């Protein structure tokens, strides 16, 4: 019996040891995680404490860091190397896990962290070529000594911080997932830049439009998917003359009907990734100096997308937001200029159907000959499992992203190759460095020439009075509608041979209107000689911004803050009166009469407390579905819908249209009937989701905004925020998407700025600075920005200083 008890005790101890020191499925080792000396208990607010002096190995000279009340670091260094070393060191201090995890996502290495459930994602991510592109870009940037110095200094700073970590001080997520950080490399920074390029330019409609054209004909596509949508006011006013001799594009290739894509289910980034920016001339402002405003719209997560920072050296003083994992300031201002970005939306991606000789994908047909593929072999390391081997072909048209059990009529296997401008090597870090140093419009535009991807609208203002905007990026020379459909990758037809010269990209400086602006709409009118694409944001946001700026004079910074939070719904202003006029009001129920009454009283402001705002937005979505879903559900998937303005124009002008009729029902629907059906369906669905008509129907409750943790860990996010705004509204807040950074800068003898983003400087959920700005962001409030000229914090109680002291 005594022996049995001894064996049992040892067995129990063995089980406990296993439970406490090894993963149990998705649960981390509980012994490590709950350890009071090294577990999650150590990720409390004490990590926010700032030392007055830190000995840091690797600096070339001492660096002074001023901390403001929000833990924004203001770095004062004596040389270029040290300022970026310190930026890497301090950004890693606050955001190391976020930085590294996003590089694993970009590179297709998530399986190393969470196991086999991420293998298919990792395969797809590698086939998209982000890792391949990052490798080529790092090799290319190595040819620019200053860029190489900046990247390496930043990496050295990150690694110096990593070396200070112990099991107790590891960020929480490493403990949750039971892994440790690896050495930071310059490749990781390039991966982050490519990941951002994918997020902003990876969405493409070619596959859907090819299917739609095949099923419904070219006339249908031309009519309902036009390049110039109704009411659009282009970024560059239509009347601008273009004083250059344009390059000539080749004739469009003949129509091609791909076979591969009919049953393809593709994954793409958020279609509403966009932004607003504008700059106002001093002749319209109260101070007489220009004002610039920007609010990039992205998916909202915690830790926040951006990291706020000031960088100061003898030749540079710049403030703004950086991308955690990349040096320099992406959006911001210096002593002379300010700049802001919106997504350009022009077409920088083409898909080609490739014909292969056999299942090895080692050769593909090009110009009637079999050409060898570059077969890229990938090893996907899987946590808790066997390493997965994957091989994909890289062709002259790009990497083969989608392939499988698909054959052409001749029996040859096929797949889709992706040609993407961000696959090409480029030096965005050099461009951003040049922007940070720019002193005027000339030096700013010169710096932009190296910024290839993602394409962006750069708004600009300078203290000398200049304002400007430029539709910047690397755009292939195309014929009209080239790139709107999947092409055949069997000859030179549709290949990219040249790009629009930088000095012929759309831009305008100091227009007579006194302002420039962009909201992801079409960049040019019909007289611009190059074709840039067709699938731009609809007219509403851009039109509303221009309408307000045109009416304003004696503008102050506070006026720009109000415009950032503008909730006016121009689409509702256009369509709601007409839709209500079509309702059969005598057939409405009591609650529908009450809802209609609120719609009639609504002032088109999509404020958080407005029930009518949510009802209208859902009514419109149901109406779009009623018109298009029967025709556009093709091969089991609802394809790209026409733009809102196109559908609105049809409803306003066409009483009878074949597409109003639902082909799946015996009844023949017309315009009035589908409007009524959509209204009734909306009320029925919302009643089921939200209960009786009342407070739960308010926009801020029914939709609101969720800012989830990057891993969607419950308790580490901020769900259910009562936001207003929405699609097509200047305040573009949505369910999990919206303004990721609001900034207003007034130039002058010394710039004045305000800003806010929905989160905080720290990536540690236990920190007071993790989400401290969220409530102010929801309320439309801003922080005054401290733009310092020196590290002297005497008589400034809100500021403190840390000295980073060099030691070898």
Image (spheres, helix red, strand yellow):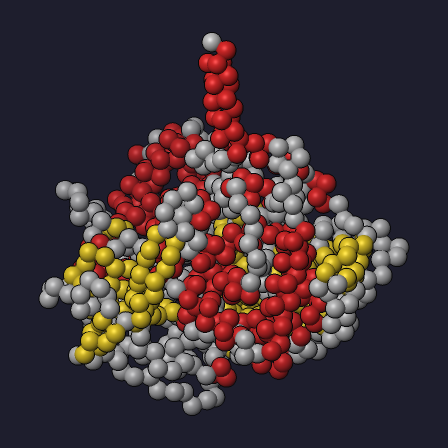
Residue located at (35% from left, 30% from top): 589
Q: Please tell me whether residue 544 is drawn above or below residue 355 in the rendered image.
A: above
Give the farthest residue toward the front: 3
Residue located at (47% from left, 64% from top): 194
Q: Nearer the viewer, residue 524 or 132?
A: 132
Residue 713 shows in this picture: yes
Image quadrant where residue 238 sits: bottom left
Residue located at (41% from left, 42% from top): 384
Q: Please tell me whether residue 389 is drawn above or below residue 588 in the rendered image.
A: below
Q: Nearer the viewer, residue 462 or 19?
A: 19
Give the farthest residue toward the bottom: 245
Residue located at (55% from left, 63% from top): 185
Residue 746 at x, y percent in the picture: 70, 66
Q: Nearer the viewer, residue 303 or 535?
A: 303
Tag count in the figure?
0
Image quadrant where residue 562 sits: bottom right
Residue 430 at x, y percent in the picture: 58, 74
Relative horizontal placement of residue 208, taking residue 23 as reference (left or right): left
Q: Nearer the viewer, residue 469 or 157?
A: 157
């Amino acid at each position: 019996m005594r022996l049995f008890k001894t064996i049992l005790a040892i067995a129990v101890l063995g089980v406990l040891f296993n439970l406490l020191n090894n993963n149990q499925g998705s649960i981390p080792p509980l012994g490590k995680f709950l350890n009071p000396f090294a577990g999650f208990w150590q990720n409390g607010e004490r990590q926010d404490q700032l030392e007055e002096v830190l000995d840091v190995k690797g600096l070339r000279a001492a660096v002074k860091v001023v901390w403001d009340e929000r833990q924004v670091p203001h770095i004062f260094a004596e040389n270029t190397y040290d300022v970026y070393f310190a930026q890497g060191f301090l950004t890693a201090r606050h955001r190391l896990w976020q930085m590294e995890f996003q590089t694993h996502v970009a590179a297709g290495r998530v399986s190393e962290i969470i196991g086999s459930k991420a293998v298919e994602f990792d395969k797809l991510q590698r086939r998209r070529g982000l890792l391949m592109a990052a490798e080529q870009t790092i090799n290319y940037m190595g040819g620019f000594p200053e860029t190489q110095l900046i990247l390496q200094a930043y990496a050295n700073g990150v690694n110096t911080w990593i070396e200070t970590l112990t099991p107790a001080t590891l960020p929480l997520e490493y403990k949750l997932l039971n892994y440790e950080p690896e050495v930071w490399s310059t490749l990781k920074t390039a991966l982050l830049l490519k990941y951002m390029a994918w997020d902003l330019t990876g969405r493409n409609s070619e596959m859907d439009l090819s299917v739609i054209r095949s099923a419904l004909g070219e006339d249908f596509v031309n009519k309902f998917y036009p390049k110039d949508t109704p009411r659009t006011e282009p970024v560059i006013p239509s009347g601008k003359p273009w004083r250059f001799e344009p390059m000539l594009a080749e004739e469009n290739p003949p129509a091609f009907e791909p076979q591969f894509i009919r049953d393809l289910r593709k994954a793409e980034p958020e279609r509403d990734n966009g932004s607003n920016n504008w700059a106002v001339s001093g002749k319209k402002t109260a101070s007489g100096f220009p004002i610039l405003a920007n609010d990039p719209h992205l998916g909202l997560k915690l830790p926040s997308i951006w990291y706020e920072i000031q960088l100061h050296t003898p030749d540079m003083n710049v403030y703004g937001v950086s991308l955690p994992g990349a040096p320099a300031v992406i959006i911001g201002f210096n002593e002379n200029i300010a700049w802001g970005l919106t997504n350009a939306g022009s077409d920088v991606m083409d898909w080609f159907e490739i014909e292969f000789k056999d299942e090895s994908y080692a050769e593909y047909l090009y110009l009637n000959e079999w050409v060898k593929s570059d077969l890229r072999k990938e090893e996907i390391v899987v946590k808790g499992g066997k390493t997965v081997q994957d091989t994909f072909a890289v062709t002259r048209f790009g990497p083969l992203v989608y392939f499988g059990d698909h054959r052409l009529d001749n029996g040859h296997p096929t797949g889709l190759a992706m040609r993407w401008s961000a696959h090409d090597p480029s030096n965005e870090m050099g461009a951003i460095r040049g922007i940070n140093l720019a002193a005027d419009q000339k030096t700013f535009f010169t710096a932009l020439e190296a910024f290839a991807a993602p394409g962006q609208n750069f708004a600009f203002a300078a203290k000398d009075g200049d304002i400007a905007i430029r539709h910047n990026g690397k755009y292939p020379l195309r014929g009209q509608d080239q790139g709107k459909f999947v092409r055949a990758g069997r000859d030179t037809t549709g290949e990219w041979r040249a790009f629009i010269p930088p000095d012929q990209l759309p831009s305008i400086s100091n227009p007579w209107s006194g302002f420039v602006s962009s909201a992801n709409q079409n960049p040019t009118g019909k007289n611009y000689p190059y074709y840039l694409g067709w699938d731009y944001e609809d007219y509403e946001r851009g039109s509303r911004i221009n309408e307000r700026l045109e009416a304003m004079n004696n503008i102050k910074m506070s006026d720009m803050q109000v415009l950032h939070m503008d909730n006016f719904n121009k689409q509702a202003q256009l369509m709601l009166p007409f839709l209500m006029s079509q309702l059969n009001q005598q057939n409405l129920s009591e609650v529908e009469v009450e809802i209609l009454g609120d719609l009639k009283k609504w002032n088109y402001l999509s404020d958080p407390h407005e029930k009518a705002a949510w009802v209208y937005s859902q009514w419109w979505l149901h109406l779009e579905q009623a018109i298009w879903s029967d025709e556009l559900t093709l091969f089991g998937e609802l394809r790209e819908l026409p733009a809102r303005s196109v559908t609105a124009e049809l409803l306003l002008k066409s009483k009878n249209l074949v597409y109003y009729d639902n082909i799946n029902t015996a009844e023949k629907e017309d315009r009035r009937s589908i409007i009524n059906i959509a209204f009734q369906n909306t009320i029925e669905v919302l009643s089921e989701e939200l209960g009786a008509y009342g407070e739960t129907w308010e926009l801020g409750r029914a939709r609101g905004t969720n800012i989830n943790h990057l891993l969607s860990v419950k308790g580490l996010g901020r769900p259910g925020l009562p936001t207003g705004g929405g699609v097509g509204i200047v305040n573009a807040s949505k369910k999990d998407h919206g303004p990721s950074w609001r900034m207003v800068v007034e130039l002058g003898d010394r710039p004045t700025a305000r800003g806010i983003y929905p989160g905080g400087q720290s990536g540690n959920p236990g920190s007071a600075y993790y989400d401290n700005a969220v409530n102010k962001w929801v309320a439309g409030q801003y922080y005054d920005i401290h733009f310092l000229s020196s590290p002297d914090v005497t008589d400034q109680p809100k500021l403190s200083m840390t000295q980073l002291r060099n030691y070898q």
